[in-house]
Image (cartoon, rainbow, N blue to C red):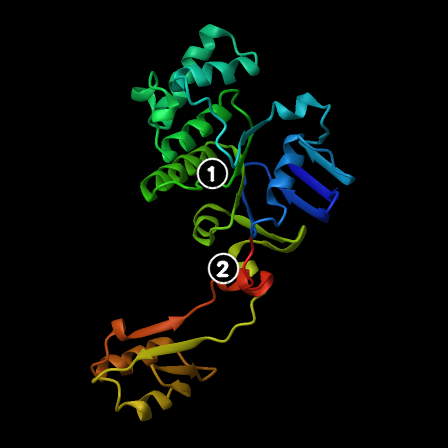
Amino acid sequence: MISIKNVTKKFPTVTALDNISLDIKEKEFFGLLGPNGAGKSTLMNLIIGYLDADEGELTVAGEKVTRNNLESRKKIGLVPQSIALYDDISAQENLEIFGSFFGIKKNLLRAVIAENLNRVELYDRRKDKVKGFSGGMKRRLNIAASLLHDPEILLCDEPTVGVDPQSRNAIFDYLEKLNEEGKTIIYTTHYMEEAERLCSRIAIIDHGKIIGAGSLDELLLLLPYEQTILISKNQLTEHKKDLFGKFGTILNDQEKYELKPFEKLKLSDFFKAMEENGIGYNFIDVNKPSLEALFLHLTGRRLRD
């Protein structure tokens, strides 16, 4: 569906994208994960045709994307990172304006607007001015605006910034439904839990380079990892060090016992022994690899402004 081959984009003071290549399949929910300033938004602007690449080629459904090719834009809807709405008019009037940009006939546009407002649960507020909307309501209206022309591809550039948990969950549910209905979705974020929940494949981008791409399971293989078991220190466990030592090497016994299991240990055998000694599951934590651990491993822990 979308092919990105050896694409580079430079600005006067920075190389935003540095020879990146990606293939995004039809009907895929694809995540772009990266720190602030990594190049995510620049890539979205190239896909939509707002910018031209300095080098390389980008195609959508086999058609080359450029700023002058308006046909490729008709296939795409964009949910921008910054809310793009007119505050002093109603939700209905906003969508009428955006619908006119796509040349949708007025009688059809009314039905399309009503359908999209219903789907983002804003139909009852359609006559209210947008300036009175919460952040989550504005984000949902932004999504509705991007879908008026029924695009094949939806680009979501950090669409949950500044919204409450209920609105985030509503946005997730709606995007998942759109994907199930056949839309290809590209979703940029720096929130690990969003990428884990939504995306079938993820590319991690930093300093304009793709530093990892694949399914979550494939990406986690990039993480140097040794499983450990953490056991809380309390009256039940503080005299059981010898017991724990039967199942692995004790690396640390300060605030918690940290156990590196023997190579052939079956966790079921370990938990059975703990239960027989009155040590419940609530005192035990198996340290597993995570997307967050991989992200920090690949991009570093230094703060980004």
* Image disc number at residue 90: none
Residue type indicated by callout 2:
Leu
Q: Quadrant of the N terminus?
A: top right
The residue indicated by pointer 2 is 291
Count of numbered badges drawn on the protein: 2
Question: SS of the residue at dot 1?
Answer: loop
Question: Which corner quadrant of the image does residue 89 belong to?
Answer: top left
Is residue 83 among what the camera can see? yes
The answer to whether 121 is drawn above or below residue 46 in the figure is: above
Looking at the rendered structure, the kind of residue marked 1 is Pro
Q: Which residue is mark 1?
A: 159
Q: Position of residue 234 (x, y in %)?
A: 24, 82
Under circle 2, the secondary element is: helix
Determine crowd level at label 1: few under 14, some 14-19, many 20+ residues with C-alpha closer than 10 A.
Answer: many
The residue nearer to you, when weighing 76 against 124, is: 124
List the single residue furthest toward the right.
Answer: 55
Q: Tell me where residue 65 appears, x and y as whole percent.
A: 71, 30
Q: Is residue 147 above or below residue 239?
A: above
State the residue at coordinates (58%, 64%).
300
Q: Give residue 14's position: percent from left, percent from top.
A: 71, 48
127 lies above or below 275: above
* Residue 220 visible, this orientation: no
Q: Residues within 10 Å of mark 2 (few under 14, many from 20)?
A: some
